[in-house]
Amino acid sequence: MKITSFFWQEIVLPILEDIKPRVIVLSAGFDAFKGEGLATMELSERFYYFAGASLSRFSLAVILEGGYSVGLRKGLPAFIRGYLEGEPELEKISPKYGTIKVVEGVREIRSEWWGI
């Protein structure tokens, strides 16, 4: 979860804080859940809980669009539980150099639209 939560904390959340949306339309794909077999990310219940909790202060319109096996059975309940409980567990993350370079690249691209 560390790489994904690092990206989430460094890219996704700052954009949301900057634009302060009234509603977020979320394409809720659970195909990246570990064991789903449709993606290589292998996200865990812990990440989906974290994502839900970190979005809990926003109104959501959620559209299910992928991951209909283990991802749906485990990822969706974890996301909903996180959203309802609303307390993301921020962990100290020590990303690898390659991860930091990817995030820096995304920041550079996004700087055209968001000054954060």
Image (tube, helix red, strand yellow):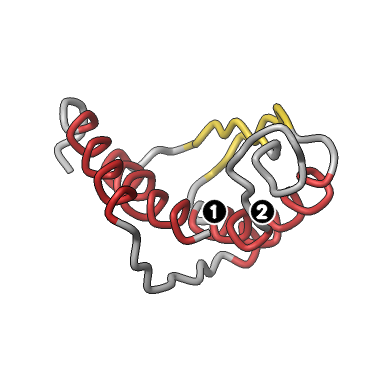
Give x and y (percent) for residue 91: 43, 72
The label number, if any, that marks residue 33 in the structure image: none
> Crowding near pointer 2: few (<14 within 10 Å), some, many (20+)?
many
Give x and y (percent) for residue 6: 39, 56
> Crowding near pointer 1: few (<14 within 10 Å), some, many (20+)?
many
Q: What residue did someone put label 1 on?
A: 51
Amino acid type assigned to the residue bearing label 2 in the image: Phe
Determine whether the residue tagged by mark 1 lies in a helix, strand or loop: helix
Give x and y (percent) for residue 89: 50, 71
Q: Earlier in the sequence, mark 1 or mark 2?
A: 1
Determine whether the residue tagged by mark 2 lies in a helix, strand or loop: helix
**Vertical side of 46 occupied by 69: above or below:** above
Quadrant housing the C terminus: top left
**Vertical side of 73 occupied by 53: above or below:** below
- Who's the residue at 71% across and 32% down the image? 38
Q: What residue did someone put label 2 on?
A: 79
**Vertical side of 15 occupied by 80: above or below:** below
| Cα gap from disc 1 to disc 2, whole angstroms | 7 Å
Q: Name the foreground residue: 116 vs 1.
A: 1
Asked where in the image residue 67 lies, by quadrant, the reply is top right
Amino acid type assigned to the residue bearing label 1 in the image: Ala
Left or right relative to 83: residue 80: right
Cβ–Cβ below 8 Å for labels 1 and 2? yes
Left or right relative to 48: residue 20: left
- Who's the residue at 84% across and 49% down the image? 73
- Who's the residue at 34% across and 60% down the image? 95
Q: How many marks?
A: 2
